[in-house]
Image (cartoon, rainbow, N blue to C red):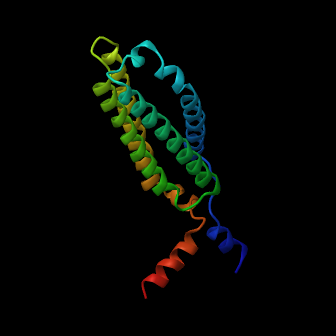
């Protein structure tokens, strides 16, 4: 095997628009960690502390903390797959977009149901809808890029040979 052929088999380095995507994932991790630790402040503001009943407050705490924890963990795993140029990156990115959509819709539902009408409910819900549509726009742009780009297909190939071996064993 000559040098030219071995160069073709090696994965491409992360470059081009993938650098922007990697920076976005890293910054998202930082924002997620900040949000996780700032939840106490948000949940004890006057608007939130007068929710309809004590069960609602406990459920809101549970939903927010559990969601923030799993989203942070997922973003860290996503960044790890990105930095290792693992073949599972694209699929996991799509999965994380789906999880974030569910989180956004859950927040909208909880704010709508749990907050009394005399609070800033409309403002909070409209901000969450804005967040949902911003996440949707980002997902459409990046998922289409990840699925169609030749560079992405040549970059995220680490682990592909092991995955194809497993598929060949399972499909005799």
Q: Is 87 above or below relative to 19?
A: below
Residue farthest toward the bottom in the current orientation of the protein: 172
Left or right side of 121 for 94 = right
Q: Is 148 above or below relative to 47?
A: below
Q: Total label count?
A: 0
Name the residue located 60 percent from the left edge and 57 percent from the top edge. 85
Name the residue located 45 percent from the left edge and 45 percent from the top edge. 142
**In front of the other: 56 or 120:** 56
Name the residue located 43 percent from the left edge and 88 percent from the top edge. 172
**In front of the other: 157 or 33:** 33
Image position, residue 167 (x, y; %): 47, 78
Q: Is residue 110 visible?
A: yes
Image position, residue 99 (x, y; %): 41, 45
Q: Is residue 134 visible?
A: no
Q: Quadrant of the N terminus?
A: bottom right
Residue 117, picture quadrant: top left
Name the residue located 46 percent from the left edge and 40 percent from the top edge. 67
């Amino acid at each position: 095997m000559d040098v030219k052929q071995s160069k073709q088999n090696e994965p491409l380095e992360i470059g081009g628009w993938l650098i922007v995507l990697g920076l976005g994932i890293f910054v998202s991790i930082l924002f997620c960690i900040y949000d996780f630790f700032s939840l106490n402040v948000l949940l004890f503001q006057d608007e939130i502390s007068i929710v309809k009943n004590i069960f609602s407050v406990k459920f809101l705490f549970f939903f927010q903390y559990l969601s923030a924890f799993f989203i942070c963990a997922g973003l860290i795993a996503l960044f790890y797959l990105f930095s290792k140029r693992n073949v599972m990156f694209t699929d996991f990115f799509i999965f994380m977009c789906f999880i974030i959509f569910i989180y956004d819709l859950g927040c909208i539902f909880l704010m709508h149901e749990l907050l009394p009408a005399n609070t800033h409910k409309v403002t909070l819900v409209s901000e969450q809808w804005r967040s949902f549509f911003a996440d949707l726009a980002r997902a459409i742009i990046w998922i289409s890029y990840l699925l169609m780009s030749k560079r992405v297909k040549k970059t995220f190939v680490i682990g592909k040979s092991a995955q194809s071996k497993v598929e060949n064993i399972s499909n005799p």
